Image: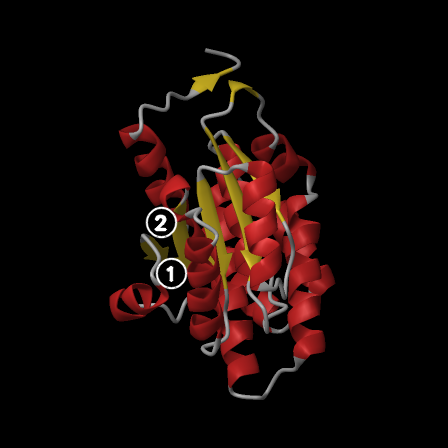
């Protein structure tokens, strides 16, 4: 147990250091040692948070954020991770449309959220990064999601999120979709400013909120192996 705890701390450090080979190697060892895939994602997420902080302080650059994203995607491709997150469901419990708002190309948190949401039975439509408000509106019209997720890591994305909500409202779509904003920097006050229904500082709490919404609307999860 002590060795696994030490391994967890090292994984976080390696992500922060953008040591792709080291992260993949140690992540594989951790999975073989019995770490749960969701716990591994939490560790990767913590390392990514540190990368984001270094970017905010201008010690890291856009290229470093992109590298961190590649590391995360490589971890998801590990056999045991893929097996965990590709569980099949005979009925999807709801549909989420997600994207990173205009002015931000960060997709790490969004990727983690998407993986966790899919593992919990949601159909997730990811429309990418640096997404303008007009595209959010058109995709909501096209896909009719139950939930719209607005992702942003940079502190200046709060205004962009507000503009998306305002555009959704002007299009007459606000009553048809719940909106959740995601980002480490978000607060209750920021959520009210944005006009979202809720916010999340991490992927797991965001997925839980989405499940609560679907549950309150009468959604029912049906696993294929139930």
Residue 167 at x, y percent in the picture: 48, 60
Mark 1: give few (<14), some (14-19) or many (20+) Cα within 10 Å.
some
Q: Which label belongs to residue 41?
A: none
In the rendered view, would you say 79 is above or below 191? above
Q: Nearer the viewer, residue 164 or 106?
A: 164
Q: Which residue is mark 1?
A: 201
In the rendered view, would you say 57 is above or below 226? below
Residue 168 at x, y percent in the picture: 46, 54
- Is any atom of residue 70 visible in this view? yes
Q: Are marks 2 and 1 in contact (CB under 8 Å)?
A: yes
Q: Which residue is mark 2?
A: 205
Element on which disc 2 rests: helix
- Is any atom of residue 5 visible in this view? no
Residue 104 at x, y percent in the picture: 59, 71
Residue ID at (67%, 77%): 62
The quarter of the picture where the C terminus appears is top left
Residue 186 at x, y percent in the picture: 36, 68
In the rendered view, would you say 118 is above or below 43? above
Q: Judge from the rendering whether residue 32 lies leftward or rightward of residue 95; answer left or right.
A: right
Q: Judge from the rendering whether residue 86 lies leftward or rightward of residue 146; answer left or right.
A: right
Mark 2: give few (<14), some (14-19) or many (20+) Cα within 10 Å.
some
Task: Single out the residue that lies furthest toward the bottom.
Answer: 58
Residue ID at (57%, 88%): 58
Q: Nearer the viewer, residue 87 or 29?
A: 87
Element on which disc 1 rests: loop
When asked about the image quadrant of residue 209, the answer is top left
Residue ID at (36%, 44%): 175
Q: Nearer the viewer, residue 39 or 112?
A: 112
């Amino acid at each position: 147990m002590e060795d696994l705890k030490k391994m967890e701390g090292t994984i976080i450090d390696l992500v922060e250091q953008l040591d792709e080979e080291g992260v993949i190697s140690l992540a594989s060892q951790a999975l073989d040692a019995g770490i749960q895939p969701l716990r591994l994602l939490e560790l990767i997420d913590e390392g990514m948070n540190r990368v984001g902080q270094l970017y905010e302080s201008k010690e890291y650059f856009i290229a470093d954020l992109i590298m961190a994203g590649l590391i995360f995607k490589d971890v998801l491709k590990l056999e045991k991770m893929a097996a965990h997150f590709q569980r099949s469901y005979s009925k999807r419990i709801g549909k989420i449309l997600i994207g990173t708002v205009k002015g931000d190309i960060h997709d790490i948190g969004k990727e983690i959220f998407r993986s966790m949401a899919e593992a919990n039975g949601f159909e997730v439509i990811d429309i990418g990064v640096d997404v303008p408000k007009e595209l959010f509106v058109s995709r909501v019209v096209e896909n009719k999601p139950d939930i719209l997720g607005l992702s942003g890591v940079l502190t200046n994305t709060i205004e962009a999120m507000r503009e998306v909500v305002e555009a959704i409202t002007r299009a007459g779509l606000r009553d048809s979709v719940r909106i959740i904003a995601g980002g480490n920097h978000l607060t209750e006050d920021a959520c009210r400013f944005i006009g979202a229904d809720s916010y999340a500082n991490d992927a797991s709490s965001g997925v839980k909120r989405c499940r609560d919404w679907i549950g309150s609307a009468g959604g029912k999860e049906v696993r294929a192996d139930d």
